[in-house]
Image (cartoon, coloured by chain):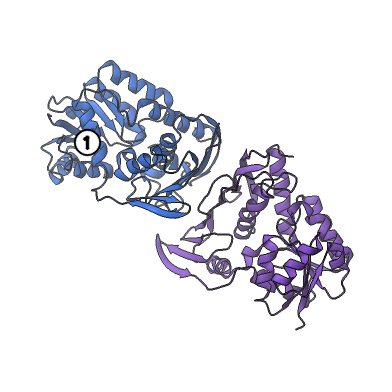
Chain colours: A purple, B blue
Amino acid sequence: MKKVRFGIIGTGGIAEKFAVSAAYVPEAEMVGAASRSLEKAQQFAQKFVIPKAYGSYEALLRDDEIDAVYIATPHSHHKENCLAAIAHGKHILCEKPLVLTKANAEQVFAAAAEKGLFIMEAMWTRFIPTFVKAKEWVNAGRIGDIRLIQASLGFHAPEDPNSRLLSKDLAGGALYDLGVYLFELTQEFTRGKRLAEVQSFSIPAATGVDGSDSIVFRHEDGTIAQLFCSLLCDVENTAILYGEKGYIKLLPDFHHPRRAELYQNYRLVETFEPEYHLGYEFEIRHAARCIAEGRLISDIIPPGDTIECEAMFEDLLFRWGYT
Amino acid sequence: MKKVRFGIIGTGGIAEKFAVSAAYVPEAEMVGAASRSLEKAQQFAQKFVIPKAYGSYEALLRDDEIDAVYIATPHSHHKENCLAAIAHGKHILCEKPLVLTKANAEQVFAAAAEKGLFIMEAMWTRFIPTFVKAKEWVNAGRIGDIRLIQASLGFHAPEDPNSRLLSKDLAGGALYDLGVYLFELTQEFTRGKRLAEVQSFSIPAATGVDGSDSIVFRHEDGTIAQLFCSLLCDVENTAILYGEKGYIKLLPDFHHPRRAELYQNYRLVETFEPEYHLGYEFEIRHAARCIAEGRLISDIIPPGDTIECEAMFEDLLFRWGYT
């Protein structure tokens, strides 16, 4: 199989993790890195042994030796970056959340489909072996039908008004950065169940973005999800899937769980704690394989999930008065 | 100090635990046990080495050698039992929930006060050393101001429509039996904060009582409590108090916690795991001391807390359509 040649757009912390992780993926090759500053791109490329550096995203997108881009810019720029990549015929792996509204998600997916390009939101959790094991346990009926999901993700973000996390201009806030994991976890483990009700509220941070969010889902069959995310408070970052016959814990931190535990009758009956690198390698491999096989979408992170998640963002942030 | 002479009204499971626990309390003396059946009362008295047995609650209440009663009947009977005890001049320790509505709670407290009698809801959790330790840690500022409380209490109750837990006639349901712990925990650790909003829903059990309840409190200062109770689903029964500077876990089960853990910067910095008997001995000792000292109410379970809790029951069950 020919290696998929990746270029990175954006050179922040998540881009660094991607570049390091890509080395663990035989199906992917890191070819270039682009920043709005050539100097930053060159520093990044040198640090991670990437052959090419570009002083603009456009320059990277014009390079015919690049098949696919990994978009690692702030959320607020994803839509524009995706559309530019599509215009230049590049396949896309884009950091979550893909975009910020349902309409934008639909627009971006349609544009990629029209050009015959692969596009996937980089929801890395779903590819991590511990998460995959939890799905296996659930599918094998080890905990029976799921009745309750409890998941929390939060930390006390540094009170720097210029930080992306707390910046309104850069689409900061707990929901975009952390809530996305709560939603996509719930999506995965309530598949086929119809949502009946959402109860929620948000506590604003001093910068005007959502600081702490409480979101509770009730499904028509009685399945409940109690979710919490926060940039104002350190929490344990554990997810528990409670079923009729037992429960599964994904811990810490559940969005890249190192350990999965299966309990029956309140007793730990199985633990799964695989060795792996940072955890990004699994999504990169999946995206590279999809692209190599000529697939346009992922079966693990299908567009429907991403669109539903963006719709939830839009609805909640509007209800909470942030938009 | 003279021993306070207790009589037990009701001879079910909780009465057994009380009788066993009273032996650990030097300030209390078990004098009598009453059931609606003399035979059951005699069996109970014999089993727990209690001198007197009565075939009616009335007979026990008429006995001048009894100072105080412990009411261990189903919730649906507490009001009537309390008022009868007050009419006979007995001090009262009554299983939680004391009664089922705010008005009834006010009535019972007023009646006891008028007769100069002690009355307290038996919220045993608040006297257990691990819980007391958590309060000490909070009061000493070890976790800073509390921002989030997460607590869940649930188990899959046997699907016996005649069981008290699932019986509508006997005031069954998750809220009365388990929710009471969620509320009184939250009360204790949000003291002085004003409640701004309650979001909740309930999933009914097959018998028509509330089976699983999700309740989320938002306080005016932004403090959140995410609570869950259920008779349909086994859950981990842990409570976590998250503060600005750390968190405390009360575990399993948090309503009679064997272990309290204090975390700072995600590291376990202190554990408290005292030896104790069943855990009822602490509330019995407190009640006996209050009575011996001529106090009419407890400072640990003040009437205001009980009344507030009953008001919450009443409001939620009405909102959920059970009443």
**Vertical comparison of A113 with B87: above or below:** below
- Where in the figure is residue B96, as x and y percent of width and height? 35, 35
Q: Residue furthest left?
A: B51
Is label 1 in a helix, a strand or a loop?
helix
**Lateral position of residue A269 relative to residue A159, left or right:** left
Q: Residue at x 23, y 28 (%)?
A: B290
**Lateral position of residue B19 relative to residue A238, left or right:** left
Q: Nearer the viewer, residue B197 or A264?
A: B197
Rendered-image quadrant of the N terminus of chain B? top left
Q: Residue at x 86, y 64 (%)?
A: A86
Q: Nearer the viewer, residue B121 or A171?
A: A171
- Where in the figure is residue A240, as x and y percent of width and height? 51, 57
**Lateral position of residue A267 relative to residue B114, left or right:** right
Q: Quadrant of residue A210?
A: top right
Please state the chain letter of the residue tagged with numbered disc 1 in the rendered image.
B
Q: Amino acid at mark 1?
A: Arg
- Where in the figure is residue B276, as x and y percent of width and height? 24, 48
Residue B278 at least partly seen: yes
**Lateral position of residue A313 relative to residue A116, left or right:** left
Q: Nearer the viewer, residue A237 or B83?
A: A237
Q: Quadrant of residue A212?
A: top right
Residue A70 at least partly seen: no
